[in-house]
Image: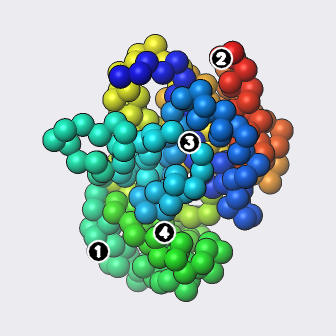
Amino acid sequence: MTKHRLIVFSDLDGCLLNKHDYQWQDARQCLLELRDRGVPLILASSKTVAEIEAIAAEIPCVNSPFISENGGAICWRSLATAGDPEIQCAGVPRSEILDLLAKLKSQFQFRSFRDLGLSGVMESTSLDAEKATAAMMRQSTEPLLWDDSENQRTEFEQILQQHKLTLTKGGRFWHVAGKISKGDALRKVVERYRNPGAVVAAIGDSQIDQSMLDAANVPIGIRVNGILSVNVSCPPGIVPQSEGARGWAEAVTELLRNFE
């Protein structure tokens, strides 16, 4: 197996993908450089397997694994081994999460993806019908919009914890899941590369990315609307001036400069 000197993990929305239009083209040249150098780019997102597969097919990158549903599933792709499933799922099945949320509807005000339905997900995400359908094909997490008070949210989270579930804030939604994280998934992927000397960089913009940044050698934080919502120690961390795909490209360019 190739010994990679650098492995890059990246969130999508607000990082490689702009928040306002989901475009990544400002990072095209940087993506090409990663691909040409053979640097694995592991996409790590709250998005589903179907969504990330579509994005991975569109952008120029090597055939790397990716992490979906905030660590709820890892699609191994080029690192798949004989006898193991290509998609490794973790955490609690979505059906169990939905059963509990249905019981909590009378106590708390929230709208999960199941409540929103296709039209509601389209409106909340500005996705077209095809992409919104892919976003709803979830296996181990359920996003929701919180419509209640902060005190109620605290009580809601405590009840989830009693059922071994977590509540984490992403860029647009709160996410209910089992005890999974992007950081745990990152460690599994790095271990599969079998190169303890590799430098691991991780790019994120929200608190749901913090575990991944904490597990990396080089954490990279992207601002959203001028605000940095993750903790990044610089150096070795990087915080670019620009946001979205342009900021992503600035940060990765600086990262690659250290490997010339």
240 w.r.t. 53: above or below: above
Local secondary structure at mark 4: helix
SS type, badge 3? loop
For the point 29% across and 74% down, which residue is it?
A: 99
Q: Position of residue 163 (x, y in %)?
A: 29, 59
Quadrant hosting residue 120 = bottom right
Label 2 residue SS: loop
Of labels 1 and 4, earlier in sequence is 1
Residue 54: percent from left, percent from top: 50, 60
As shown in the figure, which amino acid type bears the numbered disc 2? Answer: Phe
Quick one: label 2 or label 3, which is nearer the N terminus? 3
Q: Earlier in the sequence, mark 3 or mark 1?
A: 3
Q: Disc 1 to disc 4, how far (Cα)?
A: 20 Å
Q: Nearer the viewer, mark 1 or mark 4?
A: 4
> Between tags 2 and 1, which lies in front?
2
Which numbered tag is attached to residue 135? 4
Relative to 38, 87 lies left or right: left
* Residue shown at the point (38%, 66%) measured from the top left: 138
Report how far apart the C-alphas of labels 2 and 1 lie in the structure. Answer: 49 Å
> Disc 1 designates what residue?
99
| Direction left: furthest residue | 83
Q: Please state which amino acid type lies under the numbered disc 1.
A: Asp
Disc 2/disc 3 C-alpha distance (Å): 18 Å
Indicate which label's residue lies in the foreground, 3 or 4.
3
Q: Which mark is residue 150?
A: none
